[in-house]
Image (tube, grey):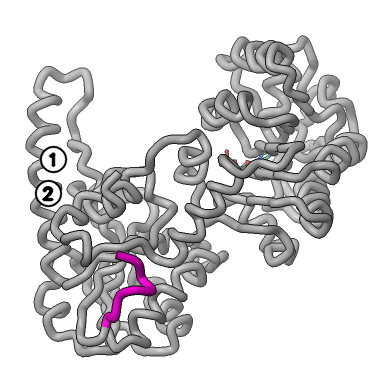
Amino acid sequence: MTLDNFNFSGKKAIVRVDFNVPLDENGHITDDTRIRGALPTLKKILADGGALIIMSHMGKPKGKVNPKMSLGQIKDAVAAALGCEVKFAPDCAKAADAAAALKPGEVLLLENLRFYPEEEGKPVGIDKADPAYDEAKKAMKASQKEFAKTLASYADVYVNDAFGTAHRRHASTAVIADFFDADHKMLGYLMEKEVKAVDNVLNNITRPFTAIMGGSKVSTKIGIIENLMDKVDNLILCGGMTYTFAKAQGGKIGVSICEEDKLDLALEIIRKAQEKGVNLVLGTDCVAGDKFSNDANTQVCPSNDVPDGWEGMDAGPETREAFAKVIRESKTILWNGPAGVFEFDNFTAGSRAIAEAIVEATANGAFSLVGGGDSVACVNKFGLADQVSYVSTGGGALLEAIEGKVLPGIAAIKGE
Ligand code: AMP
């Protein structure tokens, strides 16, 4: 079933969204992209005359109630975005009455699903090495099913619009789908758009194809880097991982962020790129700071010759130009991860140069996909989000989809 082909009039829909929005220390939303992303689906259901039950996770409460990760904090923002009142169910597994009382056009937001370990379905408090782990896992899978069944019992229809968690087989993202027949479960609009954008980058590649991977660590990006190696023409690696590469090649990196146990891996990536004919582009100069702070003193230095006590915090001018040149000449572009500590205004130049080059390439006909929380925050910060082809709401999900993996959240609905 598709959202457009379903009339929600008089029906209750339970919609899994990804409202895992970043909050500041006062609980205020710092980037509402994910809320805005789900609006078309939510509004379609209300406009049809349906009642809405919205469910999401926030953060990693690890199966325990944690007020700092309560979705109650964003209830008013959701109400403002939808333009109607939103009721709140403070316990997602005990919301049957609140759901039953919903009238057409009304909205109920459930508390953070991950306050229950059943959502993720991983046994808590037991080590994987423990001989009793397998039994605990089996028991947890059974209670996960029960939890999903409870959620399913609130509604007539299930909609999954949470691309950000589509790569997880969680109660609300996949297991719940088993309690609805094919005519009563569907992807939301956001999910449909994400699937199409990924398809453009995977199966509809116009060359040159450039992937830009940044962020703090090599270790979290290694799977995708290895997979992209078979697909891309240019691979730009930037951000904190620059210094692991610099050190691996014998460079001096001061106190820059570095994964000492990934030096061999960095050399292996360099070797593989050569073997596969991929143009691997690494930063050659950087903006270093004398402390990890926005008001640090700065100096531009070679990425492999950072003075003692200084740390590389952004791409230098030569690097920015080299990155921009490659990006401007590309026809398919994927960007995940900032080129510097972009949260500090004085260290945004590298990420900005990338974003601006992507915008220029897009204006010249390239397809550009920007994904991952931090790169999305970047393009939003620079006010350029509407000038790239597609801004994905998914980090891990996007990367797994690009790796060509089947996402459980999508398979559970499409039956693949
Ligand atoms: P990730 O979650 O791995 O995508 O990393 C995103 C984070 O990487 C952001 O918070 C950036 O501040 C950080 N980052 C980027 N460049 C650097 C750098 N040179 N040194 C330290 N952190 C960095």
Give the quadrant of residue 11.
bottom left
Instruction: Return the x and y of residue 140 as percentages of the image width and height.
Output: 12, 40
Q: Nearer the viewer, residue 14 or 127?
A: 14
**Residue occupying image coordinates x 68% and y 31%:** 232
* Residue linked to disc 2: 145
Q: Is residue 271 left or right of residue 107?
A: right
**Residue occupying image coordinates x 45% and y 60%:** 192
Instruction: Return the x and y of residue 172 as percentages of the image width and height.
Output: 25, 56
Disc 1 marks a residue whose amino acid type is Lys
Give the quadrant of residue 301.
top right
Q: Are marks 1 and 2 in contact (CB under 8 Å)?
A: yes
Q: Is 7 part of what is drawn in magenta? A: yes
Instruction: Return the x and y of residue 291 as percentages of the image width and height.
Output: 74, 39
Question: Which of the image's four quarters has the N terminus?
Answer: bottom left
Under tag 1, what secondary structure? helix
What stretch of residues is rendered in magenta?
1-8
Under tag 2, what secondary structure? helix
Question: Which of the image's four quarters has the C terminus?
Answer: top left
Dot 2 alpha-carbon crowd within 10 angstroms: few under 14, some 14 to 19, many 20 or more: many
Q: CA distance from mark 1 to mark 2?
A: 6 Å
- Relative to 35, residue 66 above or below: above
Q: Nearer the viewer, residue 91 or 368?
A: 368
Give the quadrant of residue 99.
bottom left
Ligand 1's quadrant: top right
Q: Main secondary structure of the magenta part?
A: loop
* Residue linked to disc 1: 141
- Relative to 366, residue 79 above or below: below
- Relative to 308, residue 93 above or below: below
